[in-house]
């Protein structure tokens, strides 16, 4: 594992001239997108009953694509059917910056969870990605990175979770298709966390973990969509072992 860490650090250092080169140029705009969504999630459905009940939620996302770089952000508020003390929020921002005008990228991501009752958790990933697999059919954007973590969990044995937290291997993907004259999108985001630090491994019940979601979206009107997400995780979200959740949302795209 130290070889992997040193190799990724070397690659990141070598990308610095490319990043300054992009900053010196005007970005070539391609497109942007966003949506607002509302619905509910059921922790007790799926293949595993997690015994956390049903929660109402609202989300919003925004993305912008340039020829030289891509950016996507996401915000989510959960447990809106409970008192304020029991609610939690998630914010995520991800970017790919092309290296030397290629399909290889500098990749960065921040994924934060703030829980009024359980605790706060901020994951920071930075590494390398790839944007070469895309077209009218959809896209597949893999990445690999170093993982730095900040959290307020304190282990009696290992101390606080904050600091170096291993590695991440992940991707975002989407497939566009038409069925019975209707437009659909099947999408997935997936992350595998490896070689976590001792305190975080204790909090999340494992040295490695899985975090992701598989979504089917039906675009039934020019700007409206209905989505169903199979949310899956293992040794993540404070759950020991594999768990899942079903999410049902109605959204408006702009």
Image (spheres, rainbow, N blue to C red):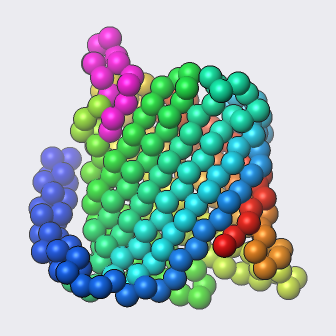
In the image, residue 162 sits, relative to residue 94, either above or below, namely above
Hey, which residue is sitting farthest right in the picture? 180
Front residue of this view, candidates 123 and 27: 27
Q: Which residue lies at the image location 54% right of the left edge and 56% below the top edge?
A: 74
Q: Which residue lies at the image location 64% right of the left edge and 52% below the top edge?
A: 59
| Quadrant (top left/top right/bottom left/bottom right) for the C terminus | bottom right
237 is within the stretch colored magenta: no
Residue 107 image offset from top left, x and y in percent: 32, 64
Residue 244, located in which quarter of the rendered image? top right
- Residue range highlighted in magenta: 149-161
Residue 137 image offset from top left, x and y in percent: 60, 84
Q: Which residue lies at the image location 50% right of the left edge and 34% below the top edge?
A: 114
Residue 5 image offset from top left, x and y in percent: 18, 51
Decide if residue 167 is in sight here: no
Decide if residue 14 is in sight here: yes
Residue 77, located in which quarter of the rendered image? top right
150 is within the stretch colored magenta: yes
Residue 86, located in which quarter of the rendered image? top right
Residue 154 image offset from top left, x and y in percent: 35, 18
Horizontal placement of 116 versus 167: left or right? Answer: right
Hey, which residue is sitting farthest top in the picture? 156
């Amino acid at each position: 594992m130290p070889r992997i860490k040193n190799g990724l650090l070397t690659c990141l250092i070598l990308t610095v001239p490319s990043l300054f080169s992009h900053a010196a140029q005007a970005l070539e705009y391609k497109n942007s997108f966003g949506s607002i969504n509302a619905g509910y999630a059921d922790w007790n459905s799926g293949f595993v009953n997690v015994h956390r009940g049903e929660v109402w939620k609202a989300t919003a996302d925004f993305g912008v694509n340039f020829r030289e770089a891509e950016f996507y952000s996401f915000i989510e508020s959960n447990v809106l059917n409970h008192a304020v003390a029991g609610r939690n929020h998630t914010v995520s921002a991800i970017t790919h910056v092309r290296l030397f005008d290629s399909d290889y990228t500098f990749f960065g991501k921040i994924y934060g969870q703030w829980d009024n009752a359980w605790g706060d958790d901020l994951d920071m990933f930075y590494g390398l990605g790839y944007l070469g697999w895309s077209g009218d059919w959809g896209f597949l954007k893999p990445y690999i990175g170093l993982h730095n973590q900040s959290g307020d969990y304190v282990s009696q044995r290992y101390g606080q979770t904050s600091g170096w937290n291993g590695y991440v291997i992940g991707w975002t993907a989407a497939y566009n298709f038409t069925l019975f004259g209707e437009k659909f999108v099947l999408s997935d985001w997936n992350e595998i966390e490896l070689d976590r630090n001792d305190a975080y491994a204790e909090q999340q019940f494992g040295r490695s973990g899985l975090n992701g979601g598989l979504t089917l979206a039906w675009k039934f009107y020019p700007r409206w969509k209905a989505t169903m997400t199979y949310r899956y995780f293992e040794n993540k979200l404070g759950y020991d072992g594999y768990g899942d959740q079903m999410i049902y949302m109605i959204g408006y795209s702009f």
